[in-house]
Amino acid sequence: RVAITAGCFDLSDECNLSCGKEIITNWALKLACWLLGLSAATFNVIVVTKMGCSIRESETGSMMCTRVLVCLIGIGDFLVGVYLIVLSVFDSIIHGKEYCSRQAEWLSGTVCSFLGVISTAGTQLSLFSMLALSLIRMWGIMNSSLIGPTRVNKRAVTKAVVIVIGIVTASLSVAIIPLVPSLEDYFVQGYFYDTDYKLFIGFPNKIKHIKTLKAYYKNDSFSTDTSWAEIGDKVDGMFTQTYGRLKKNAVHFYGNDGVCLFKYFVRSDDPKRSRTTSDTGADMVDVKGNMIVWLMLGVNLFCFVVITVSYLLIIIKSRKSAKSSGQNNNPEALRKSRKMHNRIALIVATDFACWVPFIFISGLHNLGSIDATNWYVTFAMIVLPLNSVINPLLYDNTVRQFFDRSAKNFVSGSKKVLNEVETVVSATVADDIGEGIVVAPAENIITETSL
């Protein structure tokens, strides 16, 4: 059983009965992937279009900055929706049951890299924008008595541009750095060779390459510190000019699973999780491979904490302002305040539900306390993308108002139909009864006739 399962991961026997023959094997996850992807893409296109058109109409600098950030949140969540849709297309339509035989090409291919980049960039773009928005809102509320609203001017536009450039640059850096060729020794998991060459099956990691090179060259100087570039040259030297240079593709950072996501959950057999030293043969943690994972877990947790603290300070400040200004006795002001507090509570609660359990379990998994390998797809394809569907409902009223109007129209339409049905039924019953009664002219009394 262990040997068969291992064959799934190193692709030496990936189409046996124990291995999944599709990218997403669970039908419920397939359905969730389609629904979340279409919902996230549709909702966020609406929000981005509305916000993009209204930025020029902003009356104050803070309003313009808020709309720009909400637009960025929508773009990030839209990218997550696109990722889910494209993945669903490849899973259900293009590959289908043939995925297992194409797994190596998929995990080392350009499409998988692209999906990993847009999903990571979209997630981080949304999170960093939410962080900036919470800080700007908190700053505006905490200093509302000292600084009045400023008109849109060159300084406000420059501030917004700098924020956008910073957020976009940070998000793209997180997504693209693992694919930079000069950093392949940190992030490449193995290589997939042309299937015509039988020396390397599946995608052998660095340790398997080292063993083969030591045996061929009768040289013990090869170690896990040997670079992938040097390994590639030595492998090419093993074949004559008749074969030419071997065609090979790197199994990149996002190729750790068929869903091509950021490697928050590193499998226990992953070549970047552990390696063997040439001197002692002992296993040791490869901190180079896990460094970016721990960094991003820390950054994302920090973002959530700051967002939560910012909105809590906004609630505290608004309550103090309402009390000092006597608005506590104003029903309309209380209604608006309660509505704002409910919105903030939803923002914090959804961020907590989507991010904190994911970060906590990822941390325990990478520490080796638990093995959360089987939870990876569920967390990464339902829990985190769920935020991309909820955000358009929390940060803008357009989609929510559409659903409110649709619900009201449905209710009113249903009532109208029921009333019409009731009228028709009443008229029919009256006609049926009327055939068996007669009105006595003198007394105006309704009496039964013999039927």
Image (cartoon, rainbow, N blue to C red):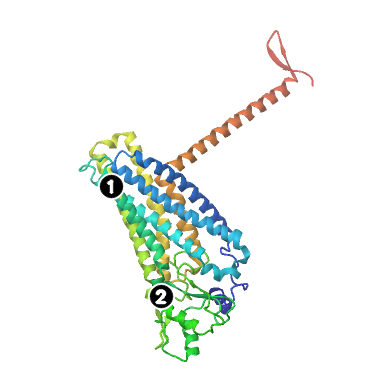
Q: Earlier in the sequence, mark 1 or mark 2?
A: 2
Q: Are marks 1 and 2 in contact (CB under 8 Å)?
A: no
Residue 379 appears in view: no
Which image quarter is the N terminus in? bottom right
The residue singled out by tag 1 in the image is 316
Q: Quadrant of residue 439?
A: top right
Residues packed near mark 1 inside 10 Å, few (<14), some (14 to 19) or many (20 plus):
few
Does the rendering let one see residue 361?
yes
Q: Amino acid at mark 1?
A: Ile
The residue sitting at 50% across, 65% down in the picture is 110
Question: Amino acid type of disc 2?
Answer: Asp
Q: Which mark is residue 185?
A: 2
Q: Is residue 304 left or right of residue 413?
A: left
Q: Residue at x 48, y 39 (%)?
A: 402
Report the front residue among 18 and 212: 212
| Residue 146 image-quadrant placement | top left
Q: Is residue 14 left or right of residue 399?
A: right
